[in-house]
Amino acid sequence: MKKLLIALMICAVAVPGIRAQNASEKDDKPTTELGKSMDDLSAAYKKLRRQVKDASHNESSLALLKSIRTAAEHAATLTPALAEDQPANKREAFVAAFHKKMHEFIANLEPLEAALKSNNNTEAAAIVAKLGDMQKKGHKEFKKPD
Ligand code: HEM
């Protein structure tokens, strides 16, 4: 009986820990090459969103913009995992539509760079918000549900 109690106590402590570890492994999965590029893009985007209104950070904002560009340009050469789920006769058009949207995303980076360089932080913040909208729409259309 005592042994059973001890075994139960060990389980009570260890099992939630194992579950938490599995959950974080699942959450952190950089699943695909596109997923990795998106993770890079996301890290830089989140920092930029936090500081974009502050002109004293514009030099660092321009560096973040560069990281976003590199990641987005790489993403624009890749294929979303959701393409596999498309009917064969629609797959090519699906991938082409994804590439087009990524290029539209990238096209916003030039005016964003100009706004930061001219200390027009209101305009820069508006473009960063627009990129966030593009993320939402892009994920709805091209990303596999989590
Ligand atoms: C501010 C802009 C964006 C941010 C911060 C962002 C962030 C992310 C993050 C964090 C992931 C998960 C990566 C992982 O698997 O670990 C992801 C995945 C993905 N994103 Fe974005 N994203 C942005 C814009 C876009 C846009 C504009 C599109 C489409 C035109 C897009 C399409 C996708 C797709 C398809 C995936 C799934 C990856 C795959 O299929 O392999 N994202 N994104």
Image: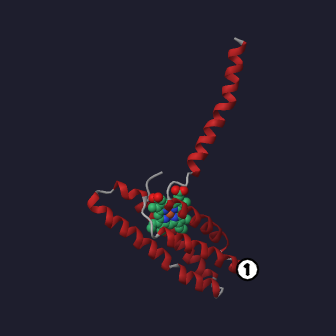
Q: Position of residue 18 (x, y in %)?
A: 63, 36
Q: Is mark 1 on a helix, strand or loop?
A: helix
Residue picked out by circle 1: 56
Res 122 → quadrant: bottom right
Residue drawn at (50%, 73%), measured in percent from left and top? 73
Numbered label tally? 1
The answer to whether residue 50 shows anywhere in this view is yes
Q: Nearer the viewer, residue 142 or 137?
A: 142
Query: Residue lying farthest left?
Result: 89
Q: Where is residue 39 in the image (x, y as percent from the top left)?
A: 57, 61
Q: Which of 143 and 76 is in front in this view?
A: 76
The answer to whether residue 136 shows anywhere in this view is no
Residue drawn at (59%, 64%), measured in percent from left and top? 40
Query: Residue lying farthest bottom?
Result: 118
Q: Label 1 is placed on what type of residue?
A: Ser
Q: Position of residue 62 (x, y in %)?
A: 64, 79
Q: Which of 25 and 143 is in front in this view?
A: 25
Q: Which of 141 and 95 is in front in this view?
A: 95
> Horizontal placement of 67 versus 57: left or right?
left
